Amino acid sequence: MNNEVLEIYHDLCYNITILLKVGDIMIKSRLKVLLAEHDMTQKDVAEKTGIRPTTISDICNSKMKHIPVNILNDLCKLFSCQVGDLFQYIDNEKS
């Protein structure tokens, strides 16, 4: 399998999407940790941000294939954090 971890591209409307490796996940979501730290549920996040509950669930469970920047922006705004606080890189080859 290809070891490409992250690719960023933009379309003609300058919408940026971040693509995460499919298969052996090397980018892991920390959203569950943030939820616990802020005593919030996935439903709370959906209600406060307008992000679809299924999208939040996919992010929590690291099942996402791509995440639009507007969703990253909404999550960072809600948790007063940086994008790097939402995810962590796991080097599967070293583990």
Image (cartoon, grey):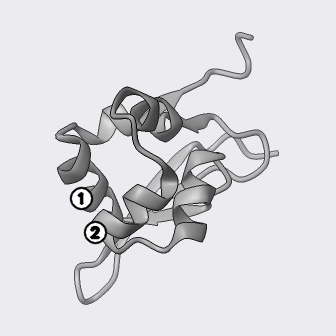
- Where disc 1 sits, the SS reads helix
Amino acid type of the residue that numbered disc 2 sits on in the rendered structure: Asn
Residue at 63% in and 34% down: 26
Q: Which residue is mark 2?
A: 70
Amino acid type of the residue that numbered disc 1 sits on in the rendered structure: Asn
Residue 36 in the image: state x and y as whole percent: 45, 30
Residue 8 seen from this side: no
Q: Check disc 2: other Cα within 10 Å, few if <14, some if 14-19, many if 20+.
A: few
Which residue is farthest top? 94
Residue at 33% in and 83% down: 11
Residue 32 in the image: state x and y as whole percent: 52, 37
Residue 46 in the image: state x and y as whole percent: 41, 66
Answer left or right for 4 relative to 78: right
Q: Which quadrant of the figure contains the C terminus? A: top right
| Separation (CA) of disc 1 from disc 2 | 5 Å
Residue at 28% in and 69% down: 70
Answer left or right for 21 relative to 46: right
Badge 1 vs badge 2, beta-carbon distance below 8 Å:
yes
Answer left or right for 18 relative to 11: right
- Where disc 2 sits, the SS reads helix
Give the image quarter of residue 5.
top right
Numbered label attached to residue 23: none
Q: Which residue is mark 1?
A: 73
Which residue is farthest right? 1
Q: Which quadrant of the figure contains the N terminus? A: top right
Residue 33 seen from this side: yes
Give the image quarter of residue 72.
bottom left
Q: Nearer the viewer, residue 4 or 42?
A: 42
